[in-house]
Structures are given as structure tokens and as C-alpha cells.
């Protein structure tokens, strides 16, 4: 198995968060983590990405404890809901600084700019880019080190129809290339289109774990997602 | 329309309260009030003035008798030579050194650290009063006043400007920069890379030090001041910039956003700047300032620039700045490891 989550817990001051969660992720899976607002979806992803530290529990990624952040950093790439880029600098600068830190050759930047159709924007400041373009830069930056695991937090949130389709295409392409992907979502069509497995969280607890078809026929779906 | 204005105004006030800007509104007047109170009240209960006389010099008997009888005002010390007396004044073991003036039977030369200082004024006023009491209106006993500090008023204010620059970078720029990186999730993005926390911290400290050094060099070049012991000066600027850059980063880690960092920065900036910069004018402020790291930078810089001081005579100040820098660096590291308010 690629990721093993054991009794992972995180409780915020206001009481929300994640109750002890156990799950395993195999290589090549494309998992949708779903649930209402505050269910713990983003918290789970952010803990896997080392953004948040768990209160307790353990995550092992490809045999390495997540506590060893430096060793795991090349294995997991995280694309946040709101791109966190150096806004006053150009697209190229943003990629360069991370390429240096990941110690990847600058040639990789050219590949990323080409792959994400950003060549015409390389000198543009991130500040003036549209949300869709920023998301592309953010994904491109995550892929600099070519991590085998990709985490997307609400990847299509706030994007228009065309850009949403573009993101779907990218996720499918990454999956086809053998990457393991976990994304959070609210959209049923996203789950149907992309996911090979659905994990549903409710009030911090894991309430469903199975294939999408089973999810849409489950009691949980009827009870929690249908009016 | 009015309703909207009121709603928005209340919202702005709520934001000001939330990001702690409101504390500045309360803090600044309070701080200035207490500082001025300390400065104004200082001369009324001033301590005894420490006067030095040369052991073998010949002073007019009437002056010696008057000084001896005014033991409630003066603390008298005897020094073996003029050189020793001057070094005592520089070390602040004496407030003033009295030498007999040549060609004047009752004339005195007063040697002080700074002509306009509180101590110098106090000695002159006291002597004038005593002389009036003993002889009535006559030629002033103090015929000349010599200052040990070199340079004009511009040079004498240089340590204050340097302190201002160092504290500005340390308490205003650095915390805001760190808080911005936290607020915009840039720091957490950098932590997605194999970069270690300590590398980020060192880079941040270095950037603060470079900013401070650049500002000091520009000031130095523009004003063209001589610096005395250049190595000692550089050593103190380096350790001071390390200390306050590190301190500022630590403050940045205590804040969730830039607005809070700016507020907290000012809350630290003024109490570090004013007691140190005004310590020459008030003994009470000096006694408070001694506990501040800013004073541990200000005094040595002043000493080096104005009194030909040397780092070898100021080890405690240097070490204390280094310790504060290292301690705040360690705290910042621990907060970063815990992803504090990120």
C-alpha cells in the first residue's frame, strides 16, 4: 500500500475536525473525499500534505512516516483550493524558486510551462492572472518534483465550465500516467467523472468508503445528500 | 445610507479590535504619558553627582571646603591623574572631573562626557548655587567645560538614528513580512519542499541583517561620519542586526496576519526605542532601559562612535544581544515546527 492512515485525529478549538480515521490507499487510486462543509475533508488532505500537524495518529507514505517531512516532500504534491503563489512575481519566478528548492533542473520549468500552456504568461506577474491560470501555475508548481501522490483540495472551486473541464482532463491524464490522486469535492458529477473510490466524511467521521456506483446507491447518500 | 455607513464603521472598528489595532490607540498615549512622566520627574530626585578631583592638583581652599561641605549633593572621588579621571568619566564612574584652571586662582575646568547632558547641567547649576552662597556674585568658578565626546550634535545623534533603523527593520518590517508569508500560505508552500525549517529561518534572519546593514551603510556614507574602532562598530551592528531580525521573526510567528504583526511591532518598537534613546536625559529611563536589548545596542554604539570605545570593553552587551537573538531564533524554530497560527 502507498498510504496508511492510522487513528489520525485533529480537533480544532471550535470542536470541528477529524475523529480517529483509519484508511489505506493503494498505488494508482483516484479517490474523491466528500462530505458537507466542516466534515473534515480539507483537514484530512492538509494533514496528508503536512500543512497541519495531527493531534494524534500516524501516516505512513511509501514506508516513510509523514513526520519525516523532508523525506516525504518529494512523494506528495498538494494543490490548495486557493493558489498560494508569490503574487508580486512572475509565473517563471514562482516556478524557479520551487525548482531550486526541489533541486530539479530548470529544463523541467520549460516542460511545465509547455504542458500547462503557460509559455505566453511566463513573464506575467501572478497578481494579474485569472483564477484559472493561477490554478494552472499552482498545479504546475506541484508537479515540478513529479510526486507520485497528488492531493487536490476542491480543484474546481470557483472555476468556469471550460476551466473545470480542463482540470478534469489534467486529473485524468495524471491518473493515466500512474499517479495516485486524492481530491476533495462537493460535486456529484466530479465524483462520477473522475473517482475510482469515494470516501465520505461526516462530522469528522468516516461514514462511507467504496466505489462511486455503490456510494450513489448507499443509505448514506440517501440520508445525507438527498433532500 | 446612514445605516450602511454606521454598519460599515462598526465593521471597521470590529476589524481594528480583532487585528489589535485598537491596542495602539490605547497604548501609544499611555506609553508617551509614562515616558514623559519619567523624564520630567527625573531632575527633582536626581541622585548625588559623582565628582572627581585630581589627587595632587592644587585647588582653591574655598572650593574644596565648599565641595566637602556639600556632601549631600556630591560624591567626591580622588583620581591619580587627569587620564585616569577621563577614563572614569567615560566609564560613567564619574559624572564630571574638575581640574584647576591655569592662570585663575579659583577657576575650574569641568570635564564631562557630553556638554548638554543632564549631569553636566546639574554640576554647573549646583556649583553656581554654592558659589552664590559662599561668595555672592563673583567670577564663575567653572571657567571652562570640556566634553569628552567627539563630533558635533549631528554625530552625537547618530546612535539614535542607527537604533531607529535597526528597530524599524526588527520590529516593523520583519514581523509583517513573516506574518504575510503565513497569512498568504506562502511559508506552508515552501514547507512542501525538502527545505528545512532552520534554513528558512536563517534566510529570514540574513535578509533582516542585510536590510539593516544596507540602511546603516547608506546613513554612514551619506553623513560621512568617522566611526572610531571600525571593527567594534561592525561587530555591534552585526550582532544587533542578528538580535533584532531574530526578535522580529519571533514576533511575526506570534501573529496570524499582517495587521496584527504591525500592531505588535509598534507595541515593541516604542518601548525599545524611547527609553534607550532618551536614557541620556533621564536617570529613571536609564534604569529601565538597562533591561532592554535595544539599550545593549545603543550604549555600545554610542560608546564606540563618540568615546572611542572598543568591543573588548563591552563583552556583556555583545553577549546579551547574541543571547537574545539565539533565544528568539530558538522560539521561532519551535513555533514553526508546531505550525503555529499557520
Image (cartoon, coloured by chain):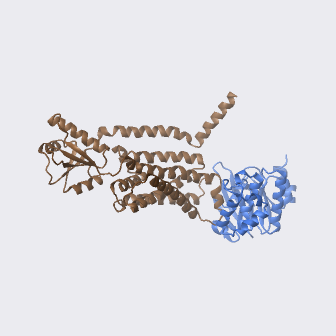
Chain colours: A blue, B brown
The N terminus of chain B lies in quadrant: top right
- Rendering coords of residue A176 (x, y %): 83, 67
Asked if one can make out residue A189 in the rendered structure from this viewpoint, the answer is: yes
Tell me the residue at 86%/55% (across/down). A216
**A224 relative to B267 in the view: left or right:** right
Q: Quadrant of residue A43?
A: bottom right
Tell me the residue at 25%/54% (across/down). B86
**B152 relative to B213 in the view: left or right:** left
Above or below for B279 versus B189: above
Tell me the residue at 80%/63% (across/down). A30
**B301 relative to B173 in the view: left or right:** left
- Rendering coords of residue A139 (x, y %): 74, 60
Near-viewer residue (A103 or A71): A103
The C terminus of chain B lies in quadrant: bottom right
Tell me the residue at 54%/58% (across/down). B332
Most extreme residue toward the bottom, as rendered? A63
Amino acid at each position: 500500500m502507498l498510504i496508511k492512515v492510522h487513528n489520525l485525529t485533529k480537533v480544532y478549538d471550535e470542536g470541528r475536525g477529524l475523529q480517529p480515521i483509519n484508511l489505506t490507499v493503494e498505488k494508482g487510486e483516484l479517490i474523491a473525499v466528500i462530505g458537507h462543509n466542516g466534515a473534515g475533508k480539507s483537514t484530512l488532505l492538509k494533514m496528508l500534505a503536512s500543512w497541519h500537524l495531527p493531534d494524534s495518529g500516524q501516516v505512513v507514505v511509501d514506508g516513510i512516516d509523514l513526520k519525516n517531512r523532508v523525506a516525504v516532500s518529494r512523494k506528495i504534491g498538494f494543490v490548495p483550493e486557493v493558489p498560494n503563489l508569490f503574487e508580486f512575481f512572475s509565473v517563471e519566478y514562482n516556478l524557479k524558486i520551487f525548482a531550486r528548492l526541489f533541486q530539479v533542473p530548470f529544463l523541467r520549468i520549460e516542460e511545465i510551462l509547455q504542458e500547462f500552456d503557460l509559455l505566453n504568461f511566463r513573464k506575467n506577474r501572478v497578481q494579474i492572472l485569472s483564477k484559472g491560470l493561477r490554478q494552472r501555475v499552482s498545479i504546475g508548481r506541484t508537479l515540478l518534483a513529479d510526486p507520485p501522490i497528488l492531493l487536490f483540495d476542491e480543484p474546481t472551486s470557483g472555476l468556469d465550465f471550460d476551466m473545470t473541464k480542463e482540470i478534469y482532463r489534467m486529473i485524468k491524464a495524471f491518473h493515466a500516467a500512474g499517479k495516485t490522486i486524492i481530491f476533495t469535492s462537493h460535486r456529484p458529477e466530479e465524483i462520477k467523472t473522475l473517482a475510482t473510490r469515494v470516501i465520505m466524511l461526516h462530522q469528522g467521521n468516516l461514514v462511507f468508503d467504496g466505489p462511486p456506483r455503490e456510494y450513489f446507491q448507499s443509505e448514506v447518500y440517501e440520508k445525507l445528500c438527498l433532500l | 445610507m446612514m445605516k450602511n455607513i454606521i454598519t460599515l464603521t462598526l465593521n471597521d472598528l470590529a476589524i481594528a479590535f480583532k487585528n489589535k489595532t485598537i491596542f495602539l490607540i490605547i497604548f501609544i498615549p499611555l506609553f508617551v504619558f509614562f515616558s514623559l512622566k519619567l523624564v520630567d520627574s527625573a531632575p527633582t530626585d536626581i541622585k548625588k553627582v559623582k565628582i572627581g578631583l585630581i589627587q595632587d592638583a592644587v585647588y582653591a581652599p574655598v572650593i574644596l571646603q565648599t565641595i566637602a561641605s556639600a556632601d549631600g549633593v556630591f560624591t567626591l572621588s580622588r583620581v591619580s591623574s587627569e587620564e585616569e579621571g577621563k577614563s572614569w568619566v567615560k566609564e560613567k564612574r564619574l559624572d564630571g572631573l574638575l581640574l584647576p584652571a591655569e592662570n585663575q586662582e579659583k577657576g575650574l575646568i569641568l570635564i564631562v562626557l557630553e556638554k548638554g547632558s543632564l549631569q553636566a547641567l546639574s554640576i554647573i547649576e549646583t556649583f553656581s548655587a554654592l558659589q552664590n552662597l559662599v561668595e555672592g556674585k563673583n567670577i564663575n568658578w567653572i571657567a571652562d567645560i570640556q566634553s569628552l565626546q567627539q563630533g558635533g550634535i549631528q554625530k552625537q545623534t547618530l546612535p539614535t538614528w542607527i537604533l531607529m533603523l535597526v528597530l524599524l527593520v526588527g520590529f516593523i518590517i520583519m514581523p509583517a513580512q513573516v506574518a504575510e508569508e503565513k497569512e498568504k500560505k506562502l511559508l506552508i508552500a515552501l514547507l512542501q519542499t525538502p527545505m528545512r525549517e532552520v534554513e528558512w529561518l536563517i534566510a529570514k534572519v540574513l535578509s533582516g541583517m542585510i536590510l539593516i546593514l544596507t540602511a546603516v551603510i547608506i546613513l554612514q556614507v551619506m553623513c560621512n561620519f568617522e566611526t572610531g574602532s571600525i571593527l567594534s562598530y561592525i561587530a555591534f551592528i552585526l550582532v544587533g542586526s542578528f538580535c533584532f531580525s531574530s526578535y522580529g521573526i519571533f514576533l511575526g510567528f506570534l501573529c496570524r496576519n499582517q495587521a496584527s504583526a504591525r500592531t505588535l511591532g509598534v507595541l515593541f518598537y516604542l518601548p525599545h526605542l524611547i527609553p534607550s534613546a532618551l536614557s541620556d536625559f533621564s536617570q529613571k529611563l536609564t534604569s529601565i532601559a538597562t533591561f532592554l536589548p535595544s539599550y545593549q545596542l545603543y550604549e555600545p554604539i554610542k560608546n564606540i562612535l563618540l568615546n572611542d570605545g572598543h568591543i573588548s570593553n563591552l563583552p556583556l552587551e555583545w553577549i546579551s544581544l547574541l543571547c537574545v537573538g539565539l533565544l528568539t531564533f530558538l522560539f521561532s524554530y519551535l513555533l514553526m515546527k508546531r505550525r503555529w497560527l499557520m
